[in-house]
Image (cartoon, coloured by chain):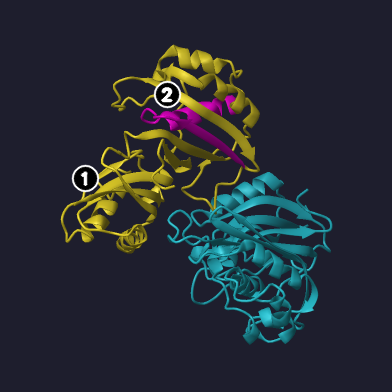
Chain colours: A yellow, B cyan
Amino acid sequence: MSQIWALRLEYDGSGFVGWQRQANGVSVQQVLEEAASKLAQGAAVASIVAGRTDAGVHAAGQVAQITLAAEWRPERLREALNFHLKPHPVVVLQAAKVSDGWNARFSARARHYRYVILNRRARPALDVNRVWHVHAPLDAEAMQAAAQFLLGKHDFTSFRASSCQAKSPVRTLDRLEVRRDGERIVVEASGRSFLHHQVRNMAGTLRWFGERRHPPEFMRVILESVSRAAAGPTAPPDGLTLSAVTYDADPFE
Amino acid sequence: MSQIWALRLEYDGSGFVGWQRQANGVSVQQVLEEAASKLAQGAAVASIVAGRTDAGVHAAGQVAQITLAAEWRPERLREALNFHLKPHPVVVLQAAKVSDGWNARFSARARHYRYVILNRRARPALDVNRVWHVHAPLDAEAMQAAAQFLLGKHDFTSFRASSCQAKSPVRTLDRLEVRRDGERIVVEASGRSFLHHQVRNMAGTLRWFGERRHPPEFMRVILESVSRAAAGPTAPPDGLTLSAVTYDADPFE
């Protein structure tokens, strides 16, 4: 009898066209499904993922699910997948059996993203492709104050990509924290789900507040405009990492 | 009149043959000196460095010195060097004028290194070339206990590369701290100067203690053996970063 597996994944998104398969390049999904197919005598293996990250976006705790016919011990499955994932910068951190009703995407209670801005004059040498380089000094406390106006359940149209396919622009943002860590400004965002580009659009808009273009309260005006044109530009994918996905019954515990 | 400059540098050592010029590849020194030469109408510019890092070793706070004939404002010099350093993963974080007697190498009071071990089953996907991957679980507290036996002034022959050109194997180790940070084990080492491969040899030996091959006190036996064969293997360069160099009169303050 076939078994459903939850896989916790880390990947460097720099060289990929994103999670989803595309005609114009290599996707994380393709690399994972091809590795899984090697364990299924070459039969196609389909995956379902918690967060469909864009090109250049990284993951430290993405969760995907696959179904395999053969029996596997979790550690052996992780090692076998990691063997076949080489040399791509994608690894399985954990593999866990899940029951039939569980779904990597629909059972997720929260997605947790981290956006890192390198805020100094010199471009990055050590964290190329891993940070958004903003050279003008940013006020992290002003960014944090502005961020608080986005918490809760709102129509997030102002932060929604035109390509977004979600039926509703209403989302509940549980956490949006901005803190300075030396030369870095770290933004942590958590919510059940996000619109397409929502975190990057929030990061690009928070930059305005870091530059003190507006007082923090103006974030409410941007939100209530319900217009993409009211918010800031989309921040680059480099700084974004899907850090974790949480479930009511955590399959990895 | 010519001016001596202190430069604080960040670089990713992965693609370099190390700091020093070599016939077999590109060095950080070469890349820096060629960028500086562009600011001197093509005349050769020689540099002196605080820590001659090996191939694959990174720097977050290396310090080098160069002499330039023309007048420069510090910010303009930093920007001009960074322009010419592109596309190499080397940047000048700060440039500061120094007086005649100052020397990047000989005036340094302390060098600070960080060695990072990724201690988990899966190989790194996000920090390729930036960590030493050790998959067997390590006891960071045992490593920290063993590390304390190396503090102070000793003959460090047990941790010295055969290629080391220092006249004396005696060094004073001011700090050697090991702590766990999630899946990472971070080793911080500080001292006026280090022997060739000393930090990597200490890291490779600390791994033994993390595996509980010996009780922490056995580190004293290894040290007192005054024999390279008594200590552990050299840890790979990937995990090592020269994090800072400090001076009595800090030129960057």
Q: Quadrant of residue B188?
A: bottom right
Question: Where in the figure is residue A93, as x and y percent of width and height?
Answer: 41, 54
Label 2 Cα neighbours within 10 Å, binned few <14 / some 14-19 / many ≥20: many
Residue at horizontal 24%, vertical 46%?
Answer: A24
Observer-nearest of A46 and B82: A46
Host chain of mark 1: A
Disc on res. A182: none
Residue at horizontal 43%, vertical 38%?
Answer: A246
Q: Which residues are magenta?
A: A184-210
Disc 2 + disc 1, Cβ < 8 Å: no
Q: Earlier in the sequence, mark 2 or mark 1?
A: 1
Q: Is residue B227 visible?
A: yes
Question: Where in the figure is residue A234, as x and y percent of width and height?
Answer: 43, 30
Disc on res. A23: 1
Residue type marked 1: Ala
Provide the residue designation for mark 2.
Answer: A159
Host chain of mark 2: A
The image shows residue A155, relative to residue A111, as above or below, that is: above
Residue at horizontal 73%, vertical 57%?
Answer: B5
Determine the secondary structure under disc 2. helix
Question: Where in the figure is residue A33, as x and y percent of width and height?
Answer: 25, 52
Q: Is residue B232 left or right of residue A92?
A: right
Q: Quadrant of residue B174?
A: bottom right
Question: Where in the figure is residue B53, as x and y percent of width and height?
Answer: 62, 68
Observer-nearest of A164 and B203: B203
Observer-nearest of B44 and B74: B74
Label 1 Cα neighbours within 10 Å, binned few <14 / some 14-19 / many ≥20: few
Q: Is residue B165 visible?
A: no
Report, in whole angstroms, how far the alpha carbon at label 2 lies from the one at label 1: 28 Å
